Amino acid sequence: MRFIHTSDVHLGKTYRTSIGEAERYEDFFICLDSIVTDAIEAKVDFVLIGGDLFHVGQILPRTFAKTIETLQPLKDANIPCLAIEGNHDWIHRRDSISWMEALSQMGYIRLLRPSRTEEGGYCFDPFNIETGMGGHIEINGLNIYGLGYIGAQAGSHVERICEAVTTKNNLLLFHVGIWTFSPVEIGNMKPEDSHPLAETFDYVALGHGHKPYIVATPAGKDYAYNPGSPEQVNFGEQKYDKGYYFVSVNDGEYEVEFKATSPRPMIVATIDLDEAEDADAALLRFVEQVKTQLPETEDDRQPLLELKLVGRVNFHPFELSRERLNVALKEIANPLHVEIKNHLSLVTHTGGEETVKKSLAEIEHDVLKELIGANSEYQSRGHLKTSVPFKCPF
Ligand SMILES: [Mn+2]
C-alpha cells in the first residue's frame, strides 16, 4: 500500500496589493496540482492532507471552484483524499458552513473529525460517504483516524485520543506542531506528551509547521511526520526543504521518502547601506548586494523578494524611495512581489559636535506628529497608537 502525505497547502494565499497577485494566487493551485498528478501516476491508495488546505477560513468562491477543479482528477481516479481541518481552515468556522465540509459532502475530500462523548472523550465514528462526516476510515486494512486542530492543550488530549482507538494498524492525521521541531507559538505540544501516540499509531501524519521534520520515540523509532508546506507560504520558508512524503507500507513497516516540490523562488536578504553618503551611492550598493543574492537557477519564474535595508546613512532615508528601489529591482531581478523593510537610520547633526541618530520609525513618528498638529481634526487624538492584531503565520 502506498500513499502521499502533504499538508499546509494554503490555497487562496496571495499578496492582495501586488501586481503579481493573480500569478501568486495560481502558485498554490499549481503546487497542489503537481501533487495530484504524482498521486495518479504512482497509483497511490490514498492522499492525506494534514490541515490548512485553505489559507483562510472564509475563502473566495473562485478558490472553492479552483480547488474542485484541482482535486477532480483524484476523484476521477477513485483515489480518496483524506483531510482534516487546520487552524487556518478552522477560524470563523462557526460563522458559516465550512468549506471543508462542503468539499467532503461533494466527495472531493473525506473530512475526518471526531465527535466528543458526554464524558469529554473522543469518538471516531465511521466515515459516512453520504453525509461526508466521520472520524475513521479503513482502507485495505489500515485504520485512518482524523483529528483536526484542537488548540493549545493538544498534549493533554493524547491519552483520551488513544483510549478512543481499539483497532490495530492505525494512522492518525493530526494538525499540531511538536515543540522543539516546530517552535510555532501556538498549537504545539511537547515531545514527551506526543510520544505515547506511537503506542497506538504506527504513523502520525502531522501538519501545522511549514518546515518538514520527523519525530522519533526516545527509543529511536520514527512515528510522526510533518511534511511542511509544499509551497513557500511566508518569507523565511526559503530555508526549508519543500515537498511531501511518499509512503509505502509493507507488513506494517513504513518506508517514508521525502519528494521535493518546486516552489516559486524566494529570496530574503539584508542589504547593508551603512555610511552611504547619498541616495545615489546607496542605490548603487543596493543593486550590487541584491545581485549577489540572486540564485543561479534555470527557474524562469519571477522570484519573491524580501529585503531589509540596514545601516546609518548620511541622507534622509525617504530619499531612497520605494519607487527608485523597485525600478532598480525590476531591471536586475524582475520580481513578482517585493517587500522592503526600511531599517535605515539617519545621521543628523544638531549644530554642535553631537550627532543624533534617528531611526526611520522615529522620523515617521515626528512626521505624523507634525501632521496631527497641523490638522485640527486629529488633534484630539494626540497620541498615536498602532495596534496590529496577532495572526499566526502558520
Ligand atoms: Mn499552515
Image: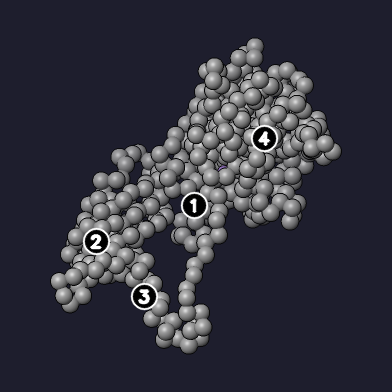
Question: Foreground mark, 2 or 1?
Answer: 2
Question: Foreground mark, 1 or 4?
Answer: 4
Q: Nearer the viewer, residue 370 or 3?
A: 370
Question: Foreground mark, 4 or 3?
Answer: 4
Q: Write the residue at 45% across / 86% down.
A: 375
State left or right for residue 277 relative to residue 165.
left
Say what amino acid the circle numbered 1 marks: Glu
Please identify the quarter of the rendering in which residue 198 is found: top right
Image location of residue 307, percent across then percent down:
35, 53
Dot placed on the residue nearer the N-terminal end, 2 or 4: 4
Dot placed on the residue nearer the N-terminal end, 2 or 1: 1
CB of residue at label 3: within 8 Å of ligand 1? no
Image location of residue 358, percent across then percent down:
29, 67
Figure check: 257 above or below 108: above
Residue labelled with disc 3: 366
Say what amino acid the circle numbered 3 marks: Asp
Residue labelled with disc 2: 312
Q: Secondary structure at mark 1?
A: helix
Image location of residue 35, percent across then percent down:
56, 34
Residue labelled with disc 1: 23
Say what amino acid the circle numbered 2 marks: Arg
Instruction: Estimate the spatial distance between the alpha carbons at disc 4 and disc 3, rounded to whole Å.
Output: 49 Å
Instruction: Estimate the spatial distance between the alpha carbons at disc 1 and disc 3, rounded to whole Å.
Output: 38 Å
Say what amino acid the circle numbered 4 marks: Ser
Instruction: Estimate the spatial distance between the alpha carbons at disc 2 and disc 1, rounded to whole Å.
Output: 36 Å
Image location of residue 256, percent across then percent down:
54, 22
Q: Residues within 10 Å of mark 3 (few under 14, many from 20)?
A: few
Figure check: 379 above or below 201: below
Residue labelled with disc 4: 156
Instruction: Estimate the spatial distance between the alpha carbons at disc 1 and disc 4, rounded to whole Å.
Output: 42 Å
